[in-house]
Each structure stands twice: as C-alpha cells, then as structure tokens.
Amino acid sequence: MDAPLWTETHTPSLGDLPQDSVRDRLERAVDEPMNLVVQGPPGSGKTAAVRALADTAHDDANDLVEINVADFFDRTKKEIREDPRFAQFLSGRSRMAKRDMINRVLKESASYAPVSGDYKTIVLDNAEAIREDFQQALRRVMEQHHRTTQFVLVTRQPSTLIAPIRSRCFPVPVRAPTAAEIETVLERILDAEGVDYDDDGVEFVAGYADGDLRKAILGAQTTAMETAEVTMTTVHETLADVGHDDALAEVWDATAAGEVTDARKTVETLLDDEGYDGQSLLVDLLETAQKRYDGDTLARLHRLAGDIDHDLVTGSDDRLHLTHLLATWAQRAEA
C-alpha cells in the first residue's frame, strides 16, 4: 500500500478513543502525570492511545520521545548507529557494546528538559522485548528522572516486566475493541476521507477484523483505494481476496538467498503494518513454504517451526523468534 496509512494519518484524539475505561484512565494521567504500563493484544490501539495522551498533555511534539524496543534488540550495532533518530547520541562511540548504546540513548533522552510544561513523555513500544539486564538499567533511569519524565511502556505481555518496574507504573489495560466500537472509528475515518459507505460495508469490515482495530482500518483503506467506496459488495470482493502471498514468498526467497536482513524487514512490515501477530504469521509462512518445499525438507522446516511456535507463546518478541527461524533455515540452505 503506497498511500499514507490511515492508521498514521487518522490517529485519534484522547476523546476519540473507543474504549471508555482507557480514555478515563489516560485523561487522569494528563493532570497527574505518572508512569504507565499500557497493555493489551495486538491491534487494540495501545500505541494510538499513548500518542493521544501525549498530544493532549504536551504543547510541543518534541516532548514525546518514542522508542520501539525492536529498533535496538533486533538490529545490529551498525544499524543502530546509522539510524538518524539515535545517531546524535552515538556519534564517535563506535566501540560501544549494544547494551551501552541502548542505555546511552535512553539516559540522554530522559535527561533533556521538557520543551514545554513540566514533564516530557518517553514511550517504549514493544516493551516485552526488553531483556532483564536492560530492565534494571531502565529502572535506575526511571528513578533518576522521575520529576521531569513520564515513562510509558507499551506491551502485549506485561508479565515479562520485572516487579520493580511494574511497581513504579500504573497499569492501563487495553482490551480489544468491540465490533460496534470499531464501526464508530471506521465511520469517523471514512467521513474524514470523503469515502462513500453503507452500514453493511462497515459492519463487514469490523467483523473481518475480529477485534483488531489496525486490521479494520487497513481493510477499509484497501477497499476504498480499490473501489472508491466501502459497501457490503465492495468489501466482500476486495477483502475476500486480500492476502500477503507475494510478501510471504519474498520472505522465503530472501531466506533461500541468504539475505536474512531483507527477510526480516518484510516480516517486520507484516507485523507492524498488516495486522499480523507472530503465531498467525508463522502459520501463513508455513502454508507458503508448502509451495516451495516438500518431503523431508518440509518436515524439517515444520520441526524447526514447532520450536519457534513454543517460543512465540512463551517468549517476549515475535520479531526475534521469527528472525531466528529464518536465520536457522538460511544456514541449513547454505549447508
């Protein structure tokens, strides 16, 4: 999808958040800034809710610092140093270990004075990927800068956070939105975009998304781009055929060629932009692999995937485990 994503161009205000309980808790956090753990399933609107909080709380956008944990833990030191968001903190420090690089970026971000108001907000997205040793460092930074910095950890798995961090944060559970709540969001976006729609079409998209707000918004955008309207007929025709076969095939093509970095980038796009969670992406990757492999080769892939599936259930980072699958398979292909 080459057009700007509606999930980015139609981020909600605090008052537009579909879940009443989330809206109420975050409105309290505007006047009484506190550290938060925003927790819930993929596609439930966690990151959008945090951005809405920051937009309400801060007059200057520079008082919101967003750090996706996967930007560190899934990347090489070279990739981190060359990222324009982090380069200013790491210039001339090429010999630093990755852990020290991460700590420096976090400490420097926390040490800056707020541009406006009394505090700034640092968001750590995909916080379930934070290793325990880094969590201890995070705890110390939270203690040192608690007067001027609000820390918000966004995660699918709050149980992966150590007790000293959880005890310093107010929990904000974000449940999957109901079909009716998704329909309200879609109608707001479609009205803003000037796209014709009917109730049946919006209802179909909400049902298709099955509680995943991101998936619903992207499904509505795909339909609108293909047919210029969102009706029962156009939605059914468009979304019934929507798939990611080409992207999934690209993952295996890159892996077979030993280009694991390219394969990982495609996986990240599918996870971040297309509404996948780790387990559903693994299932679709295996279905695509059946067109490429058979016999003993396919059986070996499934055995390896079985271990990865267990890691996806018990682990903390879908990107890490899926990349491990691809890297291991690439090594076997080269052998």
Image (cartoon, helix red, strand yellow):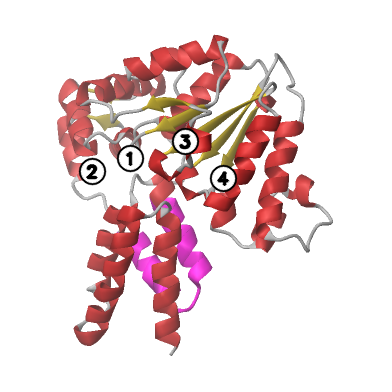
Helix, strand or loop at mark 3: strand
Helix, strand or loop at mark 1: helix
Density class for disc 1 (Cα within 10 Å; few <14, some 14-19, many ≥20) is: many
Q: Nearer the viewer, mark 4 or mark 1?
A: 4
What is the magenta range? 245-270
Calculate the distance from the C-alpha at mark 2 to the C-alpha at mark 1. Answer: 8 Å
Calculate the distance from the C-alpha at mark 4 to the C-alpha at mark 1. Answer: 39 Å
* Marks 4 and 2, the one that precedes in the sequence: 4
Amino acid tagged 3: Val
Residue 88 shown left or right of residue 32 in the figure: right
Q: Main secondary structure of the magenta part?
A: helix
- Classify 186 as above or below 303: above
Q: Which residue is mark 4?
A: 135
Q: Nearer the viewer, residue 284 or 331?
A: 331
* Marks 1 and 3, the one that precedes in the sequence: 3
Calculate the distance from the C-alpha at mark 4 to the C-alpha at mark 2. Answer: 44 Å
Is residue 65 something one can see in this rendering? yes
* Marks 3 and 2, the one that precedes in the sequence: 3
Which of the 4 image quarters holds residue 41? Answer: top left
Density class for disc 4 (Cα within 10 Å; few <14, some 14-19, many ≥20) is: some
Q: Which residue is mark 3?
A: 154
Residue 99 shown left or right of residue 255 in the figure: right
Helix, strand or loop at mark 4: helix
